[in-house]
Amino acid sequence: MKIESPRTFADLVGFRPEATEGHEQETHGTTVLALRYDQGVLMLADRRATMGNLIMYDQAEKVMPLDDASLVAISGSFARSIEVCRMLKHSFKYYKRMFLSEMSQEGKLQEISRALAGNLPAAMQGIGVFLPILATYDPGTERFSLYFFDTAGARFEHPEYATAGSGSERIRGIFEYLSRTKGSFAGRQLKDVLGDGLHMLDIAADLDSATGGFLKVPPCAWTLTASGVQPLELDAKTLAPYRAS
């Protein structure tokens, strides 16, 4: 009898998002954003996780690398997001070991869309709803890309920025205003773009109770460059000028 090898890591481990049961009261994470700058992509996220009107945790890690050329930030159902991101990370490694080459950027995007589409039945019941944003670097074309998704797995690309989470609706127009008044994010230095990102995160925290801002805890901050992914350490002195007075 012929036994077919599993094509993906999800097939190997029997990962089926639609079969995962959730609970009416879930822990959720909120505002995440990604901005281009002259050397790559900056990704920021507050660290608050909520359950209804309760603040469950203020140390949540919402930005994580999937590999050396892919950086993802998560919003929505925190446990569900972490589960899917771990599966995706192992899926990329599994593909590399199976086929002795990196998964293409299109393949990575399809894996994310597949996970979101598989989660749709639960999401329609209000269980396990999560929305990621993704930053990628393609060494072949030397191109950075930013993507955001809907709950059905459809993906959308923007050359300058991406955002998700309940606080994102409060600040979405600010991205366009800044790009029109200050110029393209992709043409500006990291320090300047970081300042804009922190201001927007602080505004989102003021207008959205589920967004933690960075009054007590520094936000998650990562960069994606041609050299790879790297966490960005933000201390109290760096953050002070960007807090609302």
Image (cartoon, rainbow, N blue to C red):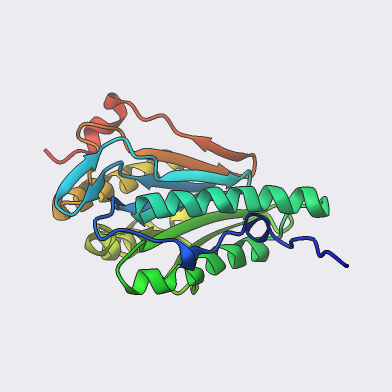
Position in image of residue 113 (x %, y %) = 54, 68
Does any portion of residue 172 appear in the rendered image? yes
Above-or-below relation of 44 to 108: above
Q: Residue furthest right?
A: 1
Q: Is residue 239 left or right of residue 205?
A: right
Q: Is residue 49 left or right of residue 188?
A: left
Does any portion of residue 39 appear in the rendered image? no
- The part of the image, by quadrant, that contains residue 169 is bottom left
Position in image of residue 243 (x %, y %) = 19, 38
Q: Residue furthest front?
A: 1
Position in image of residue 145 (x %, y %) = 56, 60
**Residue at screen point 71% across, 59% down:** 141
Q: Nearer the viewer, residue 24 or 179?
A: 24
Above-or-below relation of 121 to 34: below
Position in image of residue 209 (x %, y %) = 15, 51
Q: Check the picture and name the quadrant holding the C terminus.
A: top left
**Residue at screen point 15% across, 55% down:** 207
Above-or-below relation of 36 to 47: below
Q: Check the picture and name the quadrant holding the N terminus.
A: bottom right
Q: Is residue 169 left or right of residue 62?
A: left
Above-or-below relation of 147 to 59: below
Q: Nearer the viewer, residue 37 or 107?
A: 107
**Residue at screen point 39% across, 40% down:** 61
